[in-house]
């Protein structure tokens, strides 16, 4: 049986993609180093790299990688896993990382809704400030419902496109 043919990657082209996509993430509000680490993980075939591999590819210190991975893990965008038979960790990005990140944002929206509801109660819904908070609360409640419906549609669409594989 013949071995599958794999195209050689142009390391310069990969590096350009990583930096370009990371720049887009930074422009959207992500910190620079987590954006670079996330883009590097996305661009790796395995979807996982060690701290040393990330540091070498991105030309950064282990401390920079560690801080970036901590942030990405808190955002549910990467997970840590042990290398079999080793104490070293690998950092993995999963195909559902966007779902996880958006679901995490959903929890933030819920907390904002609770805070806004308390604000409306304390300010009174008929005051100018209370009305402003009521409108903001209504917006977040609307977004919350839309995200839930959108994620259901995404799961069905993903199943159609990619099957059950994650």
Image (cartoon, grey):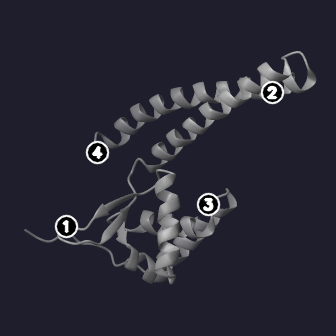
Which residue position holds label 3?
25
> In what element is the residue under mark 3?
helix
Lower position in the chain sequence, tag 4 or tag 3: 3
Q: Residue at x 67, y 57 (%)?
A: 29
Q: CA distance from mark 4 to mark 1?
A: 23 Å
> In what element is the residue under mark 4?
loop
Q: Are marks 2 and 1 in contact (CB under 8 Å)?
A: no
> In what element is the residue under mark 1?
loop
Q: CA distance from mark 1 to mark 3?
A: 32 Å
Q: Is residue 103 left or right of residue 111?
A: left
Q: Are marks 3 and 2 in contact (CB under 8 Å)?
A: no
Q: CA distance from mark 4 to mark 3?
A: 26 Å
Q: Residue at x 36, y 36 (%)?
A: 160
Lower position in the chain sequence, tag 1 or tag 3: 3
Which residue position holds label 1?
84
Residue 134: image x %, image y %?
Answer: 79, 22
Mark 2 residue crowding within 10 angstroms, few (<14) / some (14–19) / many (20+): many
Which residue position holds label 4?
165
> In what element is the residue under mark 2?
helix
Which residue position holds label 2?
133
Q: Nearer the viewer, mark 4 or mark 2?
A: 2
Residue 74: image x %, image y %?
Answer: 50, 53
Q: Quadrant of the N terminus?
A: bottom left
Q: Residue at x 30, y 40 (%)?
A: 163
């Amino acid at each position: 049986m013949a071995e599958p043919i794999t195209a050689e990657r142009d390391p310069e082209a990969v590096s350009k993609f990583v930096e370009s996509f990371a720049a887009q993430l930074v422009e959207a509000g992500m910190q620079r180093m987590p954006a670079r680490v996330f883009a590097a993980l996305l661009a790796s075939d395995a979807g996982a790299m060690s701290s040393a591999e990330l540091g070498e590819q991105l030309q950064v210190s282990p401390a920079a990688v560690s801080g970036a991975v901590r942030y990405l893990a808190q955002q549910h965008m990467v997970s840590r896993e042990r290398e079999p038979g080793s104490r070293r960790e690998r950092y993995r990005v999963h195909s559902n990382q966007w779902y996880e990140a958006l679901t995490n944002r959903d929890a933030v929206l819920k907390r904002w809704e609770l805070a806004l509801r308390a604000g409306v109660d304390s300010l009174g819904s008929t005051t100018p400030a209370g009305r402003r908070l009521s409108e903001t609360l209504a917006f977040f409640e609307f977004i919350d419902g839309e995200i839930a419906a959108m994620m259901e549609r995404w799961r069905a669409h993903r199943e159609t496109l990619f099957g059950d594989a994650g």
